[in-house]
Amino acid sequence: MNIIETKNLTKGTGAAMRVSDLDLAVPEGCVYGFLGPNGAGKTTTLKLLLGLLKPTNGTITFFGQKMTEQNRLSILSHTGSLIENPSYYGHLTGLENLQIIAKLKKVPAAEIEKALNTVRLYEQKDKKVRQYSLGMKQRLGIAMALLGNPRVLILDEPTNGLDPAGIQEMREFIKDLPTTHQMTVIVSSHLLSEVEQMADMVGIIHHGRLVFQGTMATLEAQGDGLEEVFLKLTEGGESL
C-alpha cells in the first residue's frame, strides 16, 4: 500500500517551472530517499506535500485520501516534518521548546519525555538551546516533528552541516523509525552515500522531473548503483 501518492504534481509554469508532472509512490513502512542535486526541486516537492505551497496542477493523496483545502489540516495532523532549519527559541531549554510545541499540537505532555529519549536528548533537556551543538539542534527539530506520533515523517536534508559522527547517528536513527515507531519516512538528500545507506525506496529528481523511482533491490538487480543510474538518466551526465 502506498501511504503517499502524487499524480502530475506541478509547481510553476514555463521558465519558472520548479516541479513538473511528478508521480510519487511512497509505500507504507519504508524509508524513501528523495535524491537530487541542489536546486532539483526536492524542497519544493516536500513543501507541496505539506501544504506549504499550492500546486499549479496535479493531486496529492495521503492515506488513500485526496488532499483538499477542506481535509488538509486533518491529514497533516498525522504527519511530522523538518524542512530546512529547525525553528526554536534559543533562550529556552530543549524541554521548554518541546512543551510549547506539545501545546500547539494538543498532544499529552507525557509524549515529550518519549520524544527526548527517542532522539537521545533527555540528558540535555534542561540546557538552553543556544548552547546546543548543530547536531543537537537537528535532533531537537526531529523531536518536535515526532510529537503526536505521526504516521509519516518528512525530513529535508537532515544531515546538513553535521560532523561524521552526527551523520552516522542521524542515519541509524532514521533507518530504525519504520521498525521502532511504525513510521514511514521521506528523507531528501543530495548525498549519494546517505541515500544508499538509509533508504529502501529511491526517487531521483532532476530539473523538477522524476527520472527514477524504485527499490534499492531493483538497482542492485540491474547491477547499477545510484551514481550510475543518476549519470544515465539525468541530462548531460551531471553528477551529484
Image (tube, rainbow, N blue to C red):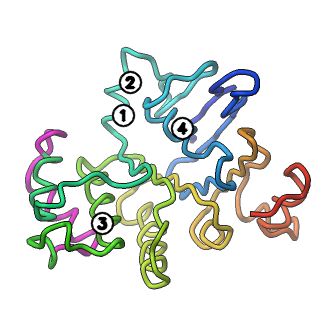
- Estimate the spatial distance between the alpha carbons at disc 4 and disc 3, rounded to whole Å: 28 Å
Tag 4 secondary structure: strand
Q: Type of residue at label 2?
A: Arg
Q: Position of residue 82 (x, y in %)?
A: 39, 51
Q: Say which label, 4 or 1, has the lower sequence index.
A: 4
Q: From the viewer's perspective, is 58 left or right of 48?
A: right
Measured along the vertical axis of the image, is residue 16 above or below residue 123? above
Q: Type of residue at label 4?
A: Ile
* Residue of label 2: 72
Q: Where is residue 18 in the image (x, y as percent from the top left)?
A: 66, 33
Q: Say which label, 4 or 2, has the lower sequence index.
A: 4
* Residue of label 4: 4
Q: Say which label, 4 or 3, has the lower sequence index.
A: 4
**Label annotation for residue 20:** none
Which of the pair 72/134 is nearer the observer? Answer: 134
* Residue of label 1: 76
- Asked whether the beta carbons under mark 2 and mark 1 sit within 8 Å of each other, the answer is yes
**Label annotation for residue 137:** 3
**Start-end of magenta stretch:** 103-122
